Image (tube, coloured by chain):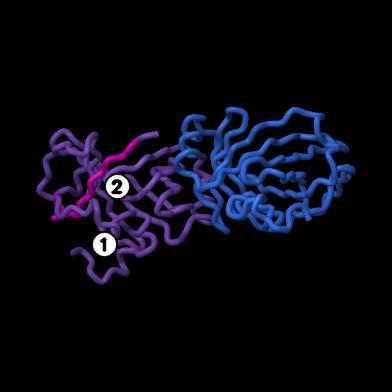
Chain colours: A blue, B purple
Amino acid sequence: MGVEIERKFLLANDGWKNRVKGDTIRQGYLSADHDRVVRIRVMNQQAFVTIKSSTDGLFRNEWEYPIPLEDAQEMLENLCVRPLIEKVRYRIPHDGMIWEVDEFFGENAGLVIAEIELEAVDQTFDLPDWVGREVTEDPHYYNTNLMRNPYQAWSDKGK
Amino acid sequence: MGVEIERKFLLANDGWKNRVKGDTIRQGYLSADHDRVVRIRVMNQQAFVTIKSSTDGLFRNEWEYPIPLEDAQEMLENLCVRPLIEKVRYRIPHDGMIWEVDEFFGENAGLVIAEIELEAVDQTFDLPDWVGREVTEDPHYYNTNLMRNPYQAWSDKGK
């Protein structure tokens, strides 16, 4: 079991792009409950089932197990809640830390989010100039809510 | 992925008991959705996460993965929907097949169910004389419903 501390930002510009090759991610949910999330993810032909204790705020417990790719593909096709989340993840080094930038496709096309994982809530870090507004506490940007209410349907996109 | 074909019966008498040692099972659900079940189970100090496509009728798809015991115990304590399902499972050979008899405890104490797993829907099998009424199609006896509406709360117990 690991504890995740993540902060999440919108992007100010494209300064992060074309520096690195991205990883294609396709994921879906078996449970997107407020209290317990069960996610099936395929990233670069590797598959995982991930269990999270809550999607709220900075903290959550997380357990992740590798599973056979063909099991994951079958669950994504036939079992997971619609729509699936499709994105390309870029890992961008900056000031000794790694930023993960997720560029969404499908029903969330147009959305790009930058995330940084911290070891303590009060850990300081340098903001790259391509990072925009922080949305850590905004539920609209939780992946589970991007399934329920995809970005393409938002009336206030990009604000 | 495996497909399960199971038939389920109540017990007519105690003729099955004391022949074999039972396995203690403690399980809980991360999702008990009609369409997708995610179960955490600890049986004899071994732990599994199990994903099932549906709790209805004879057929369902099932994927099961071993996970560390301490992860499962933490999820059962802190994450799974209440109440947990506690039972002892006896495996009883009869006429070349194995019957699984589940004796429930906790909020389902008093309930005993016999199950047989088949390879085809029309497979014939001999009913032991300790097997009673078939309840395969009765939703009350689904494990997910024994969580929502435990046996101890039934007004028509044992009918």
Compared across the picture, whether B148 is left or right of A159 comes to left
Tell me the residue at 56%/33% (across/down): A47
Query: What residue sits right under mark 1 in the picture?
Result: B110
Q: How many marks?
A: 2
Please, which residue is most extreme toward the bottom here? Answer: B155
Amino acid at circle 1: Gly
The N terminus of chain A - image quarter: top right
- Describe the element under mark 2 as helix, strand or loop: strand
Could you say which is closer to the camera, residue A147 or residue A152?
A152
Q: Which residues are magenta?
A: B3-15
Percent x, y of residue A91: 76, 34
In magenta stretch: residue B11: yes
The C terminus of chain A - image quarter: bottom right
Tell me the residue at 76%/49% (across/down): A8
- Describe the element under mark 1 as helix, strand or loop: loop
Percent x, y of residue A125: 86, 46
Q: Residues within 10 Å of mark 2 (few under 14, many from 20)?
A: many
Amino acid at circle 2: Arg
Percent x, y of residue B147: 38, 60
- The answer to which quarter of the image holds residue A90 is top right
In magenta stretch: residue A158: no
Tell me the residue at 70%/36% (across/down): A89
**Upstream in sequence: badge 2 or badge 1:** 2
Q: Main secondary structure of the magenta part?
A: strand
Chain of the residue under label 1: B
Residue B89's label in the rendered image is 2
